[in-house]
Amino acid sequence: MKALFINPPIYDFSTYDLWMKPLGFLYLVDLFKKNGWETYYFDFMDRNHPFYDDIKRKEVYGCGKFYSSREIKPSIYKDVPRIYRRFGLPLETFISFKESIPDVDFIFITSGMTYWYKGVEEVINFCRENFPNTPIVLGGTYVNFCLSHAKTLGVDFLFSGKNLSNFCKEFSNHFNVSLKYYNQLSPDWSVYKKLSYLCLKTSSGCPFNCYYCGTKKVEPTYLPWDIDTIVDETLESLNTFNINDIAFYDDALLFNFKRHLEVILKKLNGNKRNLRFHTPNGLHSKFINRETSALLKEYGFKTLRLSLESVFSFRAEESSYKTTFTQFENALNLLLNAGFNKENIGVYILLGLPEQKPEEVIESIKILKGYSCKIKLAEYSPIPGTFFYEMSEKIYPQLPLSNPLFQNNSIVPLWQFDGKWDILNYIKQQSFPVK
Ligand code: SF4
């Protein structure tokens, strides 16, 4: 049997390759390979595709800009004063790729953010038109959170969730094939000819349960993964690709640090390999002590993000009491004392939460400006199935929250007042470091 796996392009106002790879999808490729299938892979978001050879690229720790083209804004965005774009490889590169491979029995498409579904739709429509008899299977984040909307795209099989054992059963039943589940799956990085960085996940789920977060819905329990397997797979990939940068995808990377991450870091022996580690997902300040900060520095962490979310204690419950402001101050000081500098440390502040006023965010920024860190604004996205989403439906019945495009954090969907875009520009400017 032969299968084609596709990671679609992204339609949005902005996007940047910040260690962005469809990690879960790579586990799926491994599953099919282990079942003896011939697999083919096309990633519209691959910045190492030969298409980029003639485009000047500036990379920082393997990250950089995607090729993009201007697109007509969907009507729901008509009042958004930003340019809407399609990010990723042009369709022609996919057409050439498809012509270079044999006919396949199945097409698998993954999906990212709910509001990126236009890219998924583009790929589905193209495949439907050009390979009308090939079944299309769709999964990923958009399907997990917007299943009924995904049903409107007309694929043959939708898979929601991350449980690949369930996937094997459902897929086998639906298509009358035999797909066996394997316990020991790993991300199949060999689908890429070249990589600028590696993404690494060492656990699933999160011990916290924040009102705005969708993690609990797809990964209900926190589970640290087998250390030796993680280390062996990572070392193998490091040897295959000439990579220095590794980004962690864990939601609670420092949880149980001594028994988990510290052991992994020691075994990877990052300082000897000149590895640079990055944590695009926020770290929890309460797990940072003197020893942790020193070890993060020693092992080569370069990009740290702290999840503060708000400087105000009245928001603590929404964030599962994961960090108090005092814990944040303490963690920041320890990291600075360990040798990290302002450039290394970004602090996430949430913006556009239900009933949140701009003044609160402006006040947070004012307070944070007194600290040696970069302020990272994280615009709130109403994720279906979360506590805040349900609350938002009640508070803002007039808003089209169930439309995935309206869940786009770039439009700060819950803020609907005159002068919104001027205020947002002002807030963004305030968050920039003083030159
Ligand atoms: S700590 Fe982060 S990953 Fe965990 S529930 Fe809260 S927002 Fe989600």
Image (cartoon, rainbow, N blue to C red):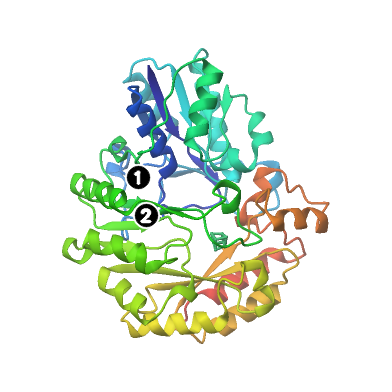
Is 426 placed left or right of 222 in the picture? right
- SS of the residue under disc 1: loop
The three-letter amino acid code for the residue at tag 2 is: Gly
| Numbered label attached to residue 47 | 1
Residue sticking out furthest to the left: 272
Q: Is residue 303 above or below residue 67?
A: below
Q: Is residue 427 above or below residue 272?
A: below
User: Which quadrant would residue 157 be assigned to in this image?
Assistant: top right
Is 165 placed left or right of 358 in the picture? left
User: What residue does disc 2 label?
Assistant: 64
The residues bearing labels 1 and 2 have C-alpha atoms spaced at a distance of: 8 Å
- SS of the residue under disc 2: loop
Q: Residue at x 82, y 55 (%)?
A: 394
Q: Is residue 40 above or below residue 301?
A: above
The three-letter amino acid code for the residue at tag 1 is: Arg
Q: Quadrant of ligand 1?
A: bottom right
Q: Residue at x 59, y 83 (%)?
A: 366
User: Which quadrant would residue 52 be assigned to in this image?
Assistant: top left
In the rendering, at what x and y percent does residue 34 appear? 33, 28
Is 123 placed left or right of 386 in the picture? left
In the rendering, at what x and y percent does residue 13 appear? 56, 51
